[in-house]
Image (cartoon, rainbow, N blue to C red):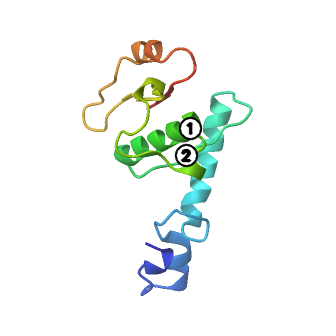
Amino acid sequence: MASDTCNTDFSHDYKDHLCPFQTHVRGGPVFIMVEHFVISKLVELFGWQQGDGIFSPGGSMSNMYGLVLARYRAHPEVKRRGAEGGGKGSQEKWRRSFVNATAGTTVFGAFDPLEEVADVCEGGRTLVTC
């Protein structure tokens, strides 16, 4: 969907500033400004020199973002060449490159044992997302 599909019955101002499509600044400038502000405050809070991030509409989309990020980190050539589908290719070359852990579900507040998850991923080659 493009930002042009927003309800424009109210006004041009509504469409330009409150449309929930956050794909670019024109589609959701208020939300992007809030996102940048909150992320910069988190970077400051953790004492980091720099950092970045994104907001997502929920846990499922967050998991998908993590999976795509891990794939591009482990295999950057996939952007140019694509991936072999259907389990083709040598399984001997396969390695773990992504683990998704839960750090507080919305309904029950459940947490995975994060230290144990980190132990499984030691060596720096596996991306852990929460």
Alpha carbon separation for disc pair 1 and 2: 6 Å
Q: Type of residue at label 1?
A: His
Residue 124, relative to residue 35: is it above or below? Answer: above
Q: Horizontal and vertical percent for residue 88?
A: 39, 40
Q: Horizontal and vertical percent for residue 110?
A: 29, 27
Q: Are marks 1 and 2 in contact (CB under 8 Å)?
A: yes
Q: Residue at x 55, y 72 (%)?
A: 17
On residue 78, which mark appears? 2
Q: Horizontal and vertical percent for residue 66?
A: 47, 39
Quarter location, residue 28: bottom right
Callout 2 secondary element: helix
Bin the neighbour count of mark 2 within 10 Å (Cα to Cα): few under 14, some 14-19, many 20 and up.
few
Callout 1 secondary element: loop
Residue 32, relative to residue 73: is it above or below? Answer: below
> Which residue is identified by label 1?
75
Q: Nearer the viewer, residue 14 or 129?
A: 129
The total number of labels drawn is 2
Residue 68, relative to residue 15: is it above or below? Answer: above
Q: Nearer the viewer, residue 10 or 93?
A: 93
Q: Quadrant of the C terminus?
A: top left
Q: Residue at x 66, y 37 (%)?
A: 51
Classify residue 93 as left or right of residue 79: left
Classify residue 34 as left or right of residue 90: right
Bin the neighbour count of mark 1 within 10 Å (Cα to Cα): few under 14, some 14-19, many 20 and up.
few
Q: Looking at the image, which residue sits at the far right? A: 49
Classify residue 86 as left or right of residue 130: left
